[in-house]
Image (spheres, coloured by chain):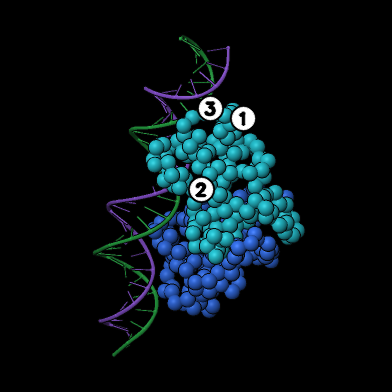
Chain colours: A cyan, B blue, C green, D purple
DNA sequence: TAAAACCTGCAACAGTAGTGCAAATTTATT
DNA sequence: AATAAATTTGCACTACTGTTGCAGGTTTTA
C-alpha cells in the first residue's frame, strides 16, 4: 500500500513513527504549522528535540518550507510543488487569518515581481498577507 | 534646539537617556535593527529589559515597525511615513542582503496588490525580498 | 539474522522574551 | 525652585525556544 510515506524513502530517510506522524500532520492540514502546534497535535508523544530535528530534516530535504512571520515564530508548510533538497520554490503568497489564526499557503497566488531601486539584485521574494480567510468571512 | 526628540514628547513619552539613544540609533541607521544590534550599539548601557520595553513602546506609538523574517528574529525599523499609535502603514518592501546581512526599507517600493482567492479579505501585506544590495553588488 | 547506519531521548546549555516590584528619573504643580 | 505625581528603569526571577553530545534503541542493508 502506498501511504504517502514513499516521500520519506524517496528522500533517503528512514521511515520512523515520528516522521510518519509529523508528515501525516502536514498532509492532513491545509494550513501551516508551528513547532508548538506539532507538539500539541502529537500528544507529546515525541521529544521536543525529535520534533525540531524532524522539521529541520524535512526542510533540508525540500519536503516542507519555512514561512516568515512578524511575531517571532517559525511556521512550516508542505512544499506542494517542485522543491528538492537544497532548493525551494515556495514563491507563493501566504495568508494569515486574524480571526482563526491559521496560516494558509495560497499555492495559486504567486508573489508578483517588483521593481527594485538601481543596484539591488533580487534572489527570493516572500509575501505575507493578513486579513480574514474564506472560512471566517 | 530641535533634537528630533520632539518625536518622543509628541507621543506623550518622557524623554530619557535610553529612549534618546535608541531613537538616535534608528535615525542614524538606514537599515533595520534587531534587538541584539541595539544592545551592541549601546555598549550594554541599558538593561535588556529596558530595550525590550522601549522597542515595544515605540511600536505601540507608531514610531517604529516590525519586519517579518524567516529566521525567527524580529527586526525593527523607523516608520518614515504617516504611522500613528495603533495603526501602521508600512506597506513598503523590505530587502535583506545576503552579502552584508543588512535589512533595508525600500520606502519607495510599495507592496503590490495581489488577487486573492474568493472569500479572502486582505488587511495588511508584507513583502521581503532577499538578494544583493546596491552596496554589495 | 547480524552488522552498519541511522534516529531518538535525555541531560545540559545558551539565547530570547516577559513580569512584579522597589528605586530612580522625569514631568507637572505650586 | 522645590516638591508631589507620574513615569521609567534595573534587578531578580520565570518561562519558552532552540541546539548539542552521547548512550541506547530502531531501521535498513547485506
Identify the mark at residue A14; answer none if there is no mark: 3
Q: Quadrant of the C terminus of chain A?
A: bottom right
Chain at numbered mark 2: A
User: SS class of the residue under badge 2?
Assistant: strand
* Upstream in sequence: badge 3 or badge 2: 3
Asked if residue A79 lies left or right of residue C19, the reply is right
Identify the mark at residue B23; answer none if there is no mark: none
Q: Is residue B105 above or below residue B85?
A: above
Tag count in the figure? Answer: 3
Q: Quadrant of the N terminus of chain A?
A: top right
Q: According to the image, label 2 marks what residue?
A: A33
Chain at numbered mark 1: A
Q: Is residue A118 above or below residue A9?
A: below
User: SS class of the residue under badge 3?
Assistant: loop
State the image quarter where residue C21 is shown.
bottom left
Crowd band around label 1 with a 10 angstrom C-alpha radius: few (<14), some (14–19), many (20+): few
Q: On the same chain: label 3 and label 1?
A: yes
User: SS class of the residue under badge 1?
Assistant: helix
Q: According to the image, label 1 marks what residue?
A: A10
Front residue of D23/A136: it is A136
Amino acid at each position: 500500500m502506498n501511504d504517502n510515506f514513499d516521500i520519506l524513502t524517496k528522500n533517503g530517510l528512514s521511515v520512523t513513527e515520528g516522521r510518519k506522524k509529523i508528515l501525516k500532520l502536514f498532509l492532513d492540514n491545509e494550513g501551516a504549522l508551528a513547532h508548538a502546534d506539532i507538539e500539541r497535535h502529537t500528544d507529546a508523544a515525541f521529544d521536543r528535540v525529535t520534533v525540531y530535528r524532524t522539521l529541520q530534516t524535512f526542510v533540508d530535504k525540500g519536503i516542507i518550507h519555512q514561512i516568515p512571520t512578524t511575531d517571532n515564530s517559525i511556521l512550516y508548510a508542505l512544499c506542494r510543488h517542485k522543491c528538492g533538497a537544497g532548493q525551494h520554490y515556495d514563491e507563493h503568497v501566504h495568508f494569515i487569518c486574524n480571526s482563526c489564526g491559521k496560516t494558509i499557503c495560497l499555492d495559486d497566488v504567486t508573489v508578483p515581481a517588483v521593481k527594485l531601486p538601481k543596484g539591488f539584485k533580487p534572489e527570493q521574494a516572500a509575501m505575507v498577507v493578513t486579513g480574514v480567510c474564506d472560512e471566517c468571512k
